[in-house]
Every structure is written in structure tokens, then in C-alpha cells.
Image (cartoon, rainbow, N blue to C red):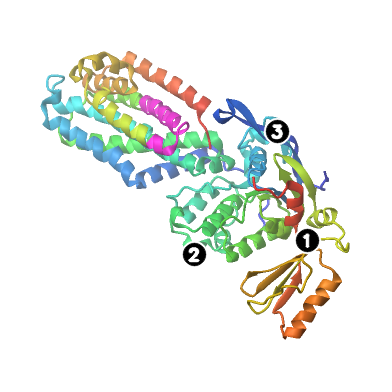
Amino acid sequence: MRSPKSPVLSINGLIKDVGPLPTLDGRMLRVVSDVSLVAGRGEVTALLGANGAGKTTTIECAQGLQKRSGGTISLLGEDPGNARAELRSRVGVMLQDGGLPPSARPLPLLRHIAGMYRNPRPLDELVQRLGIDAFSRTTVRRLSGGQKQRLALAAALIGNPEVLFLDEPSAGLDPQSRQLVFGLISELRDSGMGIILTTHLMDDAQRLADYVYIIDAGRNVAEGTVAQLLQHHTPDMTRKDHVRTLHFEALPGLDFTGVLPAEVDIRETRAGSYSATGVLTPEDLAALTAWWAAHGVMPGSMSMEARSLEDVFLDISGREVR
Amino acid sequence: MTTVTGSAPAPLLRRILLQGQYEALTMLRNGEQLILAIVLPLLAMIGLTVTPLLDGLGDSRINVAVPGILALCAMSTAFTGQGISTGFDRRYGVLRFLSTTPLGRTGLIAGKIIAVLAVLFLQVLIVSGIALTLGWRPDPTGWLPGMGLLVLGAAAFTALGLLVAGTVRPEATLAITNLLWILLGALGGIVIPAPRLPGPAQDAVHFLPSGALGQGLRDAFLHGAVDGAAVLVLLLWLVVAGAAAIRWFKWN
């Protein structure tokens, strides 16, 4: 595990049992068996994992919302299990389900939450920055998913926290909201806030995270910066026997029968969009481009798949759907 | 964005009062809650004064009816109203979110109690105001013990409402608290005194929070008396329901 200059959260050997569950004949279910992590000030730390991996349970133990069954947690130097108001005021929380009353209106709700703090963030600025002024008097139940997420983020930020927890921050966000929210998260990180987020989207982690912990089945399975994870878990891409995928766009309905060896799977995935997957050789590429030349085909685009964090993740946690 | 340094909580009392005010306004803006809190008790009061149901239990129908109506108001707001709103707040994660703010769980509960008391105060003003114009003449020495009992009853009913809201689904909370409101309202000794109830209910209702609060308020406003047994029963319900709520309340 790394040691950031100024840690805001450290979790060591976290264990969380739930139950007793009737479906397990009254036994307890261990949802987190061994998670350790450190998050620093001025950094975005991501917990990446599939649904049910234990990410939310882990950060809810860190927020003091759930009682841990074992291990230690230090949040700003204190045990969040019995957080005092002083500690809670330094920590902002955006829950996965928002936690906003459906009958409330955004502006009065934010004003109410701001009242819980001695020196809250200026409300006008926050509301404007997150585009909440456009729906400040609409009841929460009538807001879109993206609007609710932005409001929940504002509610988490209103007290001007030093540590910010975001549980699946991009859930329900349209591209514009996503841009807005991600921009704000980066800006807050740069201003020194320690940000801990959970996500099952590799893209989120790739775009936002300074450091990533991959969680699977209640335990850490890998960690590092995005670059480190990609590097450590990527086989030598120059090796000739590696499976690759070549994508290209061209006229629909082209017939590539016999152009490439039988081991290479080439298909039209949708009209005019082709992909060839297999152990591609330089000769295969030459054969393909020669066929294009002979038939007067000029592809609109082509790319060879680079390895993504998603592949790393799938390699580590398995590809089967659970 | 502006960088504001030094996060700190607002003082405890301010946090609790703010939450109380916010919840009270939310309750008062909710149409269904207003029907339950004001309209139905007033209808019950009128019903009891135009029918002979309470004849012979006191010097006038309205003098017997109003204390029970005040008790009914406490049950509406503290048990059914607070139970339903807490149940749905739990479903939507509102309780969990607020417990991560400086308000915290204790502040949240304290805020709910203040909201119940504030709404109950308005109910007492409206109901007793209308009742006085209709000829209600309470024993003036009954106000002090009466108000004390009402607060105690509201506390016991709040504990019961939170117990239901914190242990079952909100739809079930809605059904249970509404059904109990009707059952206890009709047969629980709250507006209709024990002697007018069917045989087996006559003794049993004294042990119910509804019967104890109804009888205690009638003793206070009809005779200026303090009903020790009613106080004891309500205290017992408060302690038992409060302990059970603390033990079994699920926040998510």
C-alpha cells in the first residue's frame, strides 16, 4: 500500500459481516473480508469494482454509516464509528441513492443543510456552478437523474468539507452533467480536498483517479495509479501471439470471406462497422489493405484496440457475470 | 470556486432547532397530514357534540369530547404523521444523509420531537380556540396537568411511530399507523371514554397509550385532577417503545 504525504483516510483489514440472513439459514454473510486503503489530501482515490464487490459497504463504514465487524479505520485521525459533529462537519458525503427528500425543493433544502455548518460555502456560487438555479424550485421527485446527482453533490459540498465521499458519482449523469461534475471534482482535488469515490465504470477511474484500488469479492485485488495498473497487468503488446482486435468503418455489406486466415474472426458488427479479432500478423494487415485497394474501399476510420483499464479489471476479477 | 477554510458545525441547539423548524414546515405543507392532524379531529369533535354518545359522562357533551380530541391530535401528529414521514425518509436515504451532516442521528431525533411539539401546539391552539367558541368550559386548573400529559403522550406516540417506521417497509408503516389511528381512535378509549365502549374493551383501554392519554386529559380538563395511573401507563409505553426503537431501528 502506498503512503500519501497527507492521508485523510486509512482503512486497515476492514471486515464487515451482515445478517443473520434467513437465506443462509440464519448465518452471517461476510460482505467485506479484507479491504485496506489509504486516501490522501489533494487526490482522487477510486474504489473500483463490480456491483456487489463491497465498495459501498467499505465507504459506508468509513463514513460511520455502518458499524464495521473488524479492522481499523482512521478518518482525519478519528474513528468514524462514533463521529462527533466536529468530524462530520469536515466530511462531505454523496450517497448512492441521493438521500434527498422527494417533496423538498433544491434551494430551500440546500439552505437548510447549510444551516448545520458554521461557515458554509456561498450558496449562490455553488448553485450556479452546478446549474441548480435552472431547477431550484422544482420538487426533488420531479428532477432527472442528473439533476438529482448534481443536487446531491451540492449538498455534500455545502459545508466546505476537507474530505469528500462520492458513491457512484456518474450514475444517471447525461454527458453535459458528467463534464460539469468531473470538472468540479478535478478542481476540488486541486484545491486540496481529499476525494474518495466508488465506481464500477473504468472510464470514471481512468478520467478522475490519481490512485485506484480494485476491490473484488470483499477484498483488495490490485492497486496503483491508472498508468501502473495498465502497465503491470498488460502483457507485452509487441509479442506476435497476442490477440488483438482491429476495428474499421467502411461501406456496409462487404464480404471478406477468404481474405484473412480462418483463425481470425472478422465480422460486420453493425452496418458498415467491422471488427477482426485474433492473432493478427503483419501479413494479415497487408492482405486486408490489399483487398481494400483492389476493391476501391477507403475505410472511414480504423483502429487497433489498445488495452483499457476495463481489460485489466476483467483479467483480475474474471469475465463471468456474477 | 471560492475556497473557504475551516469547516465547523453550527452550535448543537441551532442545528436541532433548524431541523425541528424544517420538519414542522414540511408536515404543515403536507395536505394529507393536515387532514389527519386538524380536519379529522375537528370533524370528530363536531360529531361527538351533535350525537348523544357522550351524554351522562359530564356536564356537557363538548366538555367530555374536547380532551379526547386533543389526545387524538397528539396521536395524529406524533404517531401516524411522524411515523409515515420517517418511514419514507428512511426509504429515500434521507435519514442516512442527514446523519452524515453535523446534525447527526441524535440531532435528527431531537428535531423530530421539536417538530411534533410545534405542530401539536398549533393543533391545540386551533382545536381549543374553536372548542371555546362552541361552548367548551374546561376546568382552569386542568391546563397545566393537561399540557404535561399531552407532551408525555406525544413522546410515547412518537417513540411508537419511530419504532414502526424504523422496522418495517414504509408502505407497511403507512398501513399500520393509519389502521391503528382508526382502531385506537374508535375503540382505544381516546375520544370515546371506556364506559361507552363494548364490554371487554372497557378495562383493556386503560393500559393502552390511547386510553391513558384520553382518560388523563378528561380527568384534567373535567375535574382539574392528575390521573397518576394514566401518567404511569404513558411513561411505561414511552420507556418500552423508546428502548425498542433504539434497539431495532434500522437506518437503511
Say which amino acid is labelled 1: Arg
Is residue A46 visible in the rendered image? The answer is yes
Residue visible at 58% across and 25% down in the picture:
A26
Q: Are marks 1 and 3 on the same chain?
A: yes
Q: Earlier in the sequence, mark 2 or mark 1?
A: 2
How far apart marks 1 and 3 lie (CA) works out to 33 Å
Q: Tell me the element at label 3.
A: strand
**Circle number at residue A134:** 2
**Circle number at residue A307:** 1
- Of the residues tagged 2 and 1, which is closer to the observer? 1
Residue A136 picture location, percent across and down: 47, 59
The residue that mark 3 highlights is A15
The chain that hosts pointer 1 is A
Q: A245 and A147: which one is in front? A: A245
Dot 2 crowding, Cα within 10 Å, few <14, some 14–19, many 20+? few
Say which amino acid is labelled 3: Ile
Dot 3 crowding, Cα within 10 Å, few <14, some 14–19, many 20+? many
For residue A266, side relative to residue B155 (left or right): right
The chain that hosts pointer 3 is A
Q: B10 and A180: which one is in front? A: A180
